[in-house]
Every structure is written in C-alpha cells, then in structure tokens.
C-alpha cells in the first residue's frame, strides 16, 4: 500500500495517496499487535486505542508513532469523506514520509526476539 501511495502521489492523486499511506500504517499496526499476541479491534478508533495501550503505554513503541498513526487517520478521513476537504501536496508528502518511518519501526519490532 505504501508503494501505491507513492505512485498515486507522483500522479498527483493526493486523496488516494493519503488513503493508501494511512492504510499501510493501519495494517502495520495490526501486524505489530499480532506480533505482541494482541488481537486488534476492527474499528479504526479501536485499533489506535489498543495500539496506544498495548504498545505505546508499555514502552514497546515510541509515542511519536501513535501520533503519526492518528495524524494519518485524520488526513484520510478528511480527504475521503469531506466533500470540500483539502489536502495539499506537502501534507501528503509528509504522510508518506511518516508512513515510511512507521513501517520501518514496526518491521524492527517484528524482527526483534
């Protein structure tokens, strides 16, 4: 999905790029929770909540990644559901960069013992 986000960004399909960047993080958060033996809820809000409780509050993942996940979700919500919602080029570039960092961090977590 991150690869799709980058391609869509290059094609200036900013709303779709924001959506794919968020979903790359959403699925990575699920993987991180599964790696810790935690069943993630299906809702977006529930996932963010459990991610924070199980991984951030316990010190497994740094707080920055929880903030990045929330920011990506908010951008995705606005770009997908707000009829006149605006998302600019720099905001999407930042989302993609944040998603790259998020995925790299989750990959490190899942590669640890």
Image (tube, rainbow, N blue to C red):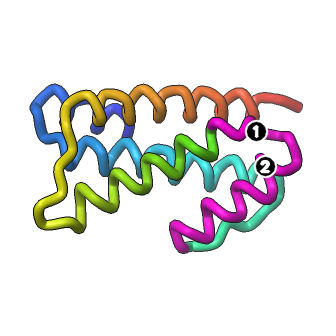
Percent position of residue 89, x then y: 20, 31
- Magenta span includes 112: no
Residue at image coords 53%, 47%: 69
Percent position of residue 45, x then y: 55, 69
Label 2: how many Cα within 10 Å (few below 14, some 14–19, many 20+): many
Percent position of residue 19, x then y: 31, 51
Label 1: how many Cα within 10 Å (few below 14, some 14–19, many 20+): some
98 w.r.t. 63: above or below = above
Q: Secondary structure at mark 2?
A: helix
**Which residues, given as a range, are shown in magenta?**
43-64
Picture quadrant where residue 6 is located? top left
Q: Secondary structure at mark 1?
A: loop
Looking at the image, do the residues carrying marks 1 and 2 touch, with CB atoms under 8 Å apart? yes
- Magenta span includes 49: yes
Residue at image coords 63%, 46%: 66
Question: Magenta region's main secondary structure?
Answer: helix
Q: Quadrant of the N terminus?
A: top left
Q: Is residue 37 left or right of residue 1?
A: right
Q: Which residue is mark 2?
A: 55
Residue closest to the eye, 75 or 4:
75
Q: Is residue 43 left or right of residue 62?
A: left
Residue 61 got which mark?
A: 1
Percent position of residue 35, x then y: 76, 49
């Amino acid at each position: 999905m991150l690869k799709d986000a980058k391609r869509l960004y290059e094609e200036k399909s900013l709303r779709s790029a924001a959506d794919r960047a968020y979903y790359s993080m959403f699925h990575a958060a699920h993987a991180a929770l599964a790696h810790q033996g935690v069943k993630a809820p299906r809702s977006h809000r529930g996932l963010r909540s459990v991610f924070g409780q199980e991984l951030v509050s316990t010190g497994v993942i740094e707080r920055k990644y929880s903030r990045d996940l929330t920011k990506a979700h908010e951008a995705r919500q606005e770009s997908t559901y707000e009829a006149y919602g605006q998302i600019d080029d720099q905001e999407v570039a930042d989302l993609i960069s944040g998603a790259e960092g998020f995925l790299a961090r989750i990959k490190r977590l899942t590669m640890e013992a």
